[in-house]
Amino acid sequence: MPIKIRSPKDLYAGLLFLFFGVLAMGMARNYPMGSAVRMGPGYFPSILGGCLTVLGMAITARSLWLVGGKIKPPVMRPLLLVLGAVFAFSFLIEAQGLLMALLALIAVSSLASWEFQFREVIFLYLLLAALSVGVFFYFLGLPFKVWPI
Amino acid sequence: MTDIFNNLSLGFSVALTMMNLFYALVGALLGTLIGVLPGIGPLATIAMLLPFTFNLPAVSALIMLAGIYYGAQYGGSTTSILVNLPGEAASVITCLDGYAMARQGRAGPALAVSALGSFFAGCSATVLIALFAPPLSELALQFSAVEYFSLMALGLVAAVVLAHGSLLKAIAMVFLGLFLGLVGADVNSGLLRFTFGIYELSDGIGVVVIAMGLFGFSEIINNLERRETRVVLHAKVQKWMPSRDDFRASWKAVLRGTTLGSFLGILPGGGAMISSFASYTLEKRLAVDPSRFGKGAIEGVAGPESANNAGAQTSFIPLLTLGIPPNAVMALMLGAMMIQGIAPGPQVMVERPELFWGVIASMWVGNLMLVVLNLPLIGIWIHLLSVPYRLLYPAILMFCCIGVYSLNHMALDVALTAVFGLLGYVFIRLDCEPAPLLLGFILGPLMEENLRRALLLSRGDPTVFFARPISLGMILLSGLLLLLIIIPAARRKREEVYRKE
């Protein structure tokens, strides 16, 4: 009899927890366990990892008989563009400074919206860049690198 | 009794300084603002602002952050009533009758009743905190590691029970949070755990990083998937004053909502959201004619709105007296305290009375500001609602990125936040509620530390948790809570409370 997945949400959630549980247990094996009286750094994570593994298995197993909803397919455009914009910021902030990092953040993330308008985004960038340099750099005195050079 | 007056007068002397008044106002206004705007909640905002509170004195920082939480409860109702969109999760239920009232041209009374109800609830909750916090923290001062461990376990169990969705998944989320909390150098041995050799992780993952990723970024991505449809009810709000009948119908609901909310706020896992849901259910059950609900029953606005504000404020009690956060927002407040170098716990009241009572007094001041400012400012808030989301979210992202980066000036933190954003997105898709994870994350290191100490004292005997009466009581209570949820009848009830969403 073929195995039928009744709840894909539970299946993937269960596998996710299982992954973290096994990861925790596996890595904790490299740390000294100690004993209950003098717990080593591996003791508590091993317990946690064990519990997480069991829970993950239970949730995975449950997906075979408990009927659950379908997973709504992800919409790639906002997901990739928003996360990509944040990654771009983190790569640029130290190398190129705040102004460039913000340009990348705002330009890329704005593309995620269904109603992207080029002129609006330029205006938004100028406004936000001026605001953040004014507030964070001058007013709060946070030590940012502002200009690319 | 004189003690309370002395304490409160100390509190007011702190809260009424120009600077703290200013920060209370900023917090309250900001809270209202984000409460009004759908798609950004107090959790994300507090996470966003945490980094910028570094340079403030501890009292001012906490006063402002607290203002955001209860301010959001005021603001959230405005959007619910006028736009039929919850501005904030705790106002979901207000949409039902609030919007119905607005369509009947009674938006004014609905807004007024919810503001006045919230104000009454806020005042009562402040008094409750002043009355109950000192004895509770006195009790807590006698706690040893054993009691603390059991207390935290109870807190996590309650958070799981009150979370919606699958129980098993919520428990798993707590464990995942506990595990993530252990990343970084071990307190006792200094050994680096789960850092994958990344030097920047040796201090652990920041609270802000996790909270902003899980609640901020994933929320933005989710909002962008929907095309926005916002219909602001542009009928002029003319008549503000609720009629005599409105008052007669709502004062009992306000009282009941306040009582229920105050109680649910103190409970671990409680807070604003569950309070408003529970209050609505209660009002509907007690009503002579339940069919009016959903068609503009004023009790359906007055009760939940009072309850969520009461719940928001009393949830400070466990945080300030025991150092245990009852919900995710309080977990962030605890993070804020630790950033300021304050070890949360019962000793705060003794060692820093000006901080403790100052924050409490500021809540009353903040509530007063809100009720005075809220109604006249509604015009402005409505205007803000017409700012399209496509202009709003890049600005929110900017604040998030700059905020995270300025924490430690580590670019890696920003990238890590994005990773947690992805994780949060996946969790939402898989129906795993992220709030229990944050609680677990905050409590993880504390639980390990207390477990260590407890077992060291008992020479490795785990029965010590059952041998001490207070600890035994808490463990029994946790077991009872878990049992309750497994009993089908109670389980149905829990689902019923959340079904209205």
Image (tube, coloured by chain):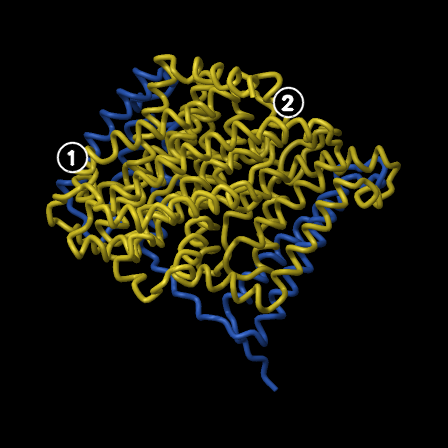
Chain colours: A blue, B yellow
- Does B157 sit left or right of B251 as displayed? right
The residue tagged 2 is: B347
Chain letter of mark 1 equals A
Residue B260 placement (x, y as % from top left): 48, 47
Chain letter of mark 2 equals B
- Does B187 sit left or right of B438 as displayed? right
Number of marks in the image? 2
At a point 39% along the width and 36% down the height, the residue shown is: B70
Amino acid marked by disc 2: Gln
At a point 65% along the width and 65% down the height, the residue shown is: A58
The answer to whether residue B363 of the structure is visible from this angle is yes
The residue tagged 1 is: A123
**Disc 2 from disc 1: Cα separation:** 51 Å
Residue A6 placement (x, y as % from top left): 53, 75
Q: At numbered mark 2, what does the secondary structure look like: helix, strand or loop?
A: helix
At a point 84% along the width and 33% down the height, the residue shown is: B457
Residue B201 placement (x, y as % from top left): 58, 33
Is label 2 on the same chain as label 1?
A: no
Using the image, determine if residue B246 lies above or below residue B13.
Answer: below
